[in-house]
Image (cartoon, helix red, strand yellow):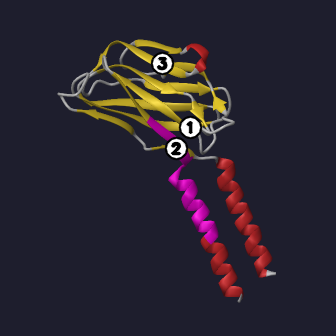
Amino acid sequence: MRTVAGLLCLGLVWGAGVSAQAMSIAPDPVTEVRTSGAPGGSLSASLQEVSISGNQAVFQLSVAAGSITGIDVGMLLNSLGSPTAFDFVTGASFGAGSGIGGTASVAAGGTQAQFDYSSAVGVGAASRSLIVTFASAVPVGYFGSVNFDNGYVTTKTYSIVPEPGALALLGFALASAAFARRRSA
């Protein structure tokens, strides 16, 4: 009877963790570092995930060295093998609040959200949050790309992973189940 109760509790805890669908990106932040001798010159910038909920991801751009004139967040896909499943970008917008002005748009074919600044985002300059809307809910396991543009474009990749809190919840549920099983034996 205790085993059944333990398994029921495990199922409820695991179900709550899965239904929360807490997600993040890895690496977080996505970082680009170039030296002064590199093409495009010196740059140290990062794009950090603020939240991922449903089909929307919110990011924040920070610049530690150099300046940046644009950033693109690419489509998500689940595999490079065949068949591939794509999650196209359907919206791009700047979040509310003060920051650097510019335009937010979607590339032809919905391949990426493009954020171009009317003046370069420099060191310590605040940038608005960048909101990317995808065609469907963002699932764990998909990955995409970020293009950093300061006159020279470099591309970094990221993947969607469970948020550490969700993993801790799952670990707690598994440990509780193991403890309940050991105790009943």
Q: Residue at 53% across / 55% down in the picture?
A: 165
Circles 1 and 3, Cβ within 8 Å, touching? The answer is: no
- Could you tell which of marks 2 and 1 lies nearer the N-terminus? 2
* Circle on res. 52: 1
Q: Amino acid at mark 1?
A: Ile
- Could you tell which of marks 2 and 3 lies nearer the N-terminus? 2
Circles 2 and 3, Cβ within 8 Å, touching? The answer is: no
Read off the magenta span: 157-174
Q: Which residue is mark 2?
A: 24
Q: Amino acid at mark 3?
A: Gln
Q: Nearer the viewer, mark 2 or mark 3?
A: 3
Q: Residues within 10 Å of mark 3 (few under 14, many from 20)?
A: many
Q: Residue at 48% across / 18% down in the picture?
A: 114
- Circle 1 SS class: strand
Q: Predominant secondary structure in magenta?
A: helix
Residue 64 position in % (x across, y down): 25, 32
Q: Residue at 48% across / 39% down in the picture?
A: 158
Horizontally, is 31 left or right of 58 in the view? Answer: left
Q: Which residue is mark 3?
A: 114
- Circle 3 SS class: strand
Classify the position of the N terminus by image quarter.
bottom right
- Is 36 a magenta residue? no
Q: Amino acid at mark 2?
A: Ser
Residue 47 position in % (x across, y down): 40, 33
- Circle 2 SS class: strand
Classify the position of the C terminus by image quarter.
bottom right
Q: Nearer the viewer, mark 1 or mark 3?
A: 3
Q: Residues within 10 Å of mark 1 (few under 14, many from 20)?
A: many
Residue 66 position in % (x across, y down): 23, 25
